[in-house]
Image (spheres, helix red, strand yellow):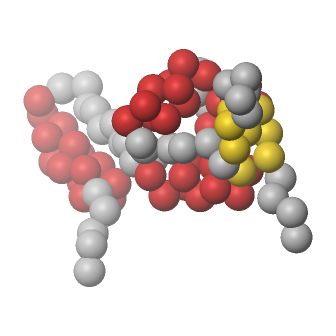
Amino acid sequence: MDKRLVKIGEAARLLGTDHSTLRKWESTGELLPARKTQGGTRYYDVAELMGFSNEAAPTLCYCRVSSHDQKADLDRQQELLSVRKV
């Protein structure tokens, strides 16, 4: 089965980022295009992009309370949102 390849603009849209970020990731070796033409057009494998976005991107959580008196609530929020590695 052939890979589904998309140009840099569509790849950036799928990852929720800008095309300049993809160029930066290419220069650092973090994410390389599946194909690059002699003219410099980059093509990315959609399956690889989806795996990259799911595994490499961290999940960030935000906890807050209105006052210092709610410190116990803040601790509870942090506990519920923290990731436990087994």
Please indicate whether residue 34 sits to the left or right of residue 73 in the image.
right
Question: Number of labelled discs?
Answer: 0
Q: Residue at 29%, 49% (x, y): give it.
A: 77
State the image quarter where residue 74 is shown.
top left
Above or below residue 23? Residue 29 is below
Q: Residue at 50%, 44% (x, y): give it.
A: 31
**Front-most of residues 30 and 75:** 30
Above or below residue 27? Residue 58 is below
Q: Is residue 13 in sight in this rendering? A: no
State the image quarter where residue 76 is shown.
bottom left
Could you tell me residue 50's position as x and y percent?
65, 53
Please indicate whether residue 40 sits to the left or right of residue 59 in the image.
right
Please indicate whether residue 86 sits to the left or right of residue 25 in the image.
left
Residue extending furthest right? 1
Q: Residue at 45%, 26% (x, y): give it.
A: 24
Q: Is residue 22 in sight in this rendering? A: yes
Instruction: Locate the N terminus by quadrant.
Output: bottom right
Q: Residue at 54%, 52% (x, y): give it.
A: 52
Could you tell me residue 49's position as x and y percent?
63, 49
